């Protein structure tokens, strides 16, 4: 085991984990906000999230084919796709609530949950249908914005890219706005999801109609970890999960001499989660449910 | 993730269509009935580019060569199945497919991990499978009478990669990533074994199903700074990995197996993969002189360049038709058993060379290539440079 290597990569893994954590946190906010109001897990949120990413990529690809992509300053482009992603996902979230949840308001808790799962499947394949008719593509690639890929090399082994900083700043900014407005509404949670989707696309570069599923599941876990319904809890839960995953993926193989590799990262991360929840069943910061009038 | 109302509706509609069509065509066919050739390959999802190429390649061959069978009084049809690159879907399709008595031969699959369990189903009824693309040794090493492939094998491809890494790329150290599938992990292990034998130090061997965030995998790689990164897997996953690795400042050279061979690799990864090498069992169309006309016809008919394995699928379907003709000789109706037996005796010179099967169903001699990506423009994927070409006989089965 190479101790020097373990120490050398530590700051970079920490940074990777925090960025991933902020990504989970942004998505987790959506789950937690809906739970705070409606008291059920909105499993369609993973698709509301990924639709934001699709809106972003469609705008970027349209700009590029119109020849405007290179000319516009990147902060403007980024702002444009963020706002558009937030708008579409926000409207979608409201629509889903009207169509799939509101008629079930008086039904037992499990019924809207099933309805949410149905909406999730429906949206996945709706995106797939639209994209195959429209572009005949399954995977869509975010056009590279060179300015966002610029990396600051802090040391020989640590660096951070502009887009990672954008993710962190945007997450903090949104948390602050949310705190200011205490905007626990459907449109708010949808908009948050849309923004997370755009940032996900910008950060990782490749999306398909099913890309929302796994991050959605992880973010839901993060929301439970932090205390479902609790907004700062979702933030902390996201970051804890992101860090656990990053450290597990980077260190497991180094620490075990290759016996356990990065493929075990989820097993490790979720084992730790189970441990935490055994001792704090209501999550790190506790569950919050709004009193019903 | 895949059960949903929309797809169910489509499946029902498709099923209705399948029921309705033969009924209509039976009225038209005045001859001895219909012979169906099935394809199984991913027609939807992230590997659809290659999967569709297999279907279209087979379609072109069937349209071109079915005349002989038609003269004997048969109607020849293609029945495409979408295996979604998933073993469970491939097996479910296989079960449907063997129930249709008119299907006498299958061309497919793309993924070894799908082909292996699906061919267990074909074996139940001795239905011949001619594979254009499955490279995992197990596909033929099981010794099944009904399984054939026209391409090379990963135990050879891994060695070709190891040899190239050591002799030409002069790599002293390598980091290996694989996708945990039968194909990807298999070829990665063959590469690893050979690279170690040639003195290349293996700094890591990681399996991952991750599709978007490769940061935590890249960080240790960057710190270890290997000469070479080998990705045993498919372009859909390898491309974002390579892209993110370059973005994070990884300077190692990239190498991969034939799973890299799709224009989607450059579509997704862009500049990051220009100059990288990959080994393949299917050379670009330009290396086969006879395939030029095929490429032109393909482009004219379907409006796009043939993807890798489309030419192999064309040859596979042509072999299937030759076997069908042999089985139908003398006016008797061809059976699955007769077709399966006939495939083994086919000696066929197609657009990818002369193919003759050995006792296991491997081609007696297969071509292996090392290719280099020349451009970040996906349209130019067909121009990738051939760096090396080898003709190697299939190894004997190890039991």
Image: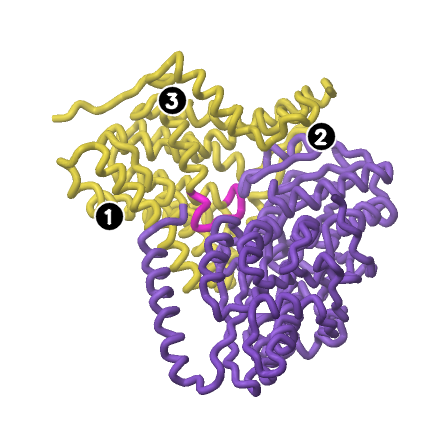
Give the left or right position of residue A190, taking residue B399 as reference.
Answer: left
Residue A139 appears in view: no
Q: Which mark is residue A287?
A: none
How packed is label 3: few (under 14 Cα within 10 Å), some, or many (20 or more)?
many
Residue B362 appears in view: yes
Q: Is residue A23 above or below residue B343?
A: above
- Both marks 1 and 2 on one chain: no
Question: Percent x, y for residue A105?
Answer: 15, 37
Q: Chain of mark 1?
A: A
Q: Examine the structure image and report whether residue A136 is included in the region drawn in magenta.
A: no
Residue that badge 2 annotates = B223
SS for callout 1:
helix
Q: Colour of chain A?
A: yellow
Q: Quadrant of the N terminus of chain B?
A: top left
Q: Quadrant of residue B360?
A: bottom right
Q: Which residues are magenta?
A: A202-212
Q: Chain of mark 3?
A: A
In three-dimensional space, the C-alpha distance between marks 1 and 2, rounded to whole angstroms, equals 48 Å
Residue that badge 3 annotates = A226
Residue that badge 1 annotates = A95
């Amino acid at each position: 085991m190479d101790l020097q290597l373990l120490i050398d990569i530590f700051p970079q893994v920490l940074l990777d984990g925090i960025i991933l954590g902020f990504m989970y946190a942004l998505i987790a906010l959506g789950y937690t906000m809906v739970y705070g109001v409606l008291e059920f897990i909105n499993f369609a949120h993973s698709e509301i999230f990924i639709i934001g990413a699709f809106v972003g990529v469609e705008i970027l690809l349209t700009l590029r084919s119109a020849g405007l992509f290179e000319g516009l300053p990147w902060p403007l482009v980024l702002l444009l796709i963020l706002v558009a992603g937030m708008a579409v996902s926000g409207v979608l979230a409201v629509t889903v609530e009207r169509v799939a949840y509101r008629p079930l308001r008086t039904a037992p808790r499990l019924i809207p949950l099933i309805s949410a799962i149905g909406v999730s499947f429906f949206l996945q394949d709706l995106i797939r249908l639209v994209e195959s008719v429209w572009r005949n593509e399954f995977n869509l690639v975010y056009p590279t914005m060179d300015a966002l890929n610029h990396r600051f090399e802090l040391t020989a082994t640590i660096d951070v890219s502009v887009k990672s900083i954008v993710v962190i700043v945007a997450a903090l900014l949104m948390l602050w706005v949310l705190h200011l407005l205490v905007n626990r509404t459907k449109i708010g949670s949808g908009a948050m999801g849309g923004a997370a989707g755009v940032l996900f696309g910008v950060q990782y570069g490749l999306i398909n109609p099913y890309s929302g599923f796994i991050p959605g599941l992880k973010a839901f876990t993060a929301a439970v970890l932090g205390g479902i319904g609790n907004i700062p809890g979702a933030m902390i839960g996201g970051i804890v999960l992101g860090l656990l995953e990053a450290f597990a993926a980077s260190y497991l193989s180094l620490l075990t001499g290759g016996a356990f590799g990065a493929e075990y990262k989820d097993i490790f991360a979720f084992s730790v989660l189970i441990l935490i929840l055994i001792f704090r069943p209501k999550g790190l910061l506790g569950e919050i449910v709004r009193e019903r009038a | 993730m895949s059960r949903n109302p929309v797809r169910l509706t489509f499946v029902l509609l498709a099923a209705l269509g399948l029921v309705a069509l033969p009924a209509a065509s039976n009225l038209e066919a005045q001859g001895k009935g219909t012979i169906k050739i099935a394809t199984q390959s991913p027609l939807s999802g992230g590997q659809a580019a290659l999967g569709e190429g297999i279907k279209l390649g087979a379609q072109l061959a069937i349209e071109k060569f079915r005349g002989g069978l038609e003269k004997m009084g048969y109607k020849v049809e293609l029945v495409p199945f979408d295996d979604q690159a998933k073993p469970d879907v491939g097996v479910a399709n296989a079960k449907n497919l063997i129930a249709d008595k008119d299907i006498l031969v299958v061309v497919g699959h793309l993924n070894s991990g799908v082909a292996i369990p699906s061919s267990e189903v074909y074996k139940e009824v001795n239905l011949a499978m001619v594979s254009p693309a499955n490279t995992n040794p197990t596909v033929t090493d099981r010794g099944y009478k009904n399984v054939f492939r026209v391409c090379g094998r990963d135990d050879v491809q891994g060695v070709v990669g190891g040899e190239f890494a050591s002799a030409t790329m002069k790599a002293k150290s390598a980091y290996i990533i694989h996708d945990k599938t039968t194909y990807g992990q298999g070829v990665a292990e063959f590469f690893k074994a050979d690279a170690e034998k040639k003195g290349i130090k293996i700094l890591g061997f990681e399996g991952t199903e991750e599709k978007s965030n490769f940061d935590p995998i890249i960080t240790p790689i960057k710190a270890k700074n290997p000469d070479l990164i080998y990705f045993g897997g498919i372009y859909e996953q390898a491309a974002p990995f390579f892209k993110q690795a370059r973005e994070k400042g990884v300077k190692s050279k990239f190498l991969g197996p034939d799973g890299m061979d799709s224009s989607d690799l450059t579509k997704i990864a862009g500049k990051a993969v220009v100059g990288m090498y990959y080994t393949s069992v299917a050379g670009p169309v330009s290396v086969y002189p006879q395939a030029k006309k095929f490429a032109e016809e393909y482009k004219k008919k379907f409006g796009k360049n043939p993807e890798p394995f489309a030419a192999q699928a064309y040859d596979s379907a042509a072999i299937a038709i030759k076997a069908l003709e042999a089985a139908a000789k003398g006016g008797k109706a061809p059976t699955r058993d007769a077709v399966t037996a006939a495939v083994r005796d086919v000696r066929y010179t197609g657009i990818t060379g002369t193919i003759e099967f050995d006792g296991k169903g491997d081609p007696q001699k297969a071509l292996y290539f090392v290719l280099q990506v020349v451009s970040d423009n996906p349209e130019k994927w067909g121009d990738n440079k051939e760096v090396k070409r080898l003709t190697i006989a299939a190894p004997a089965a190890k039991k």
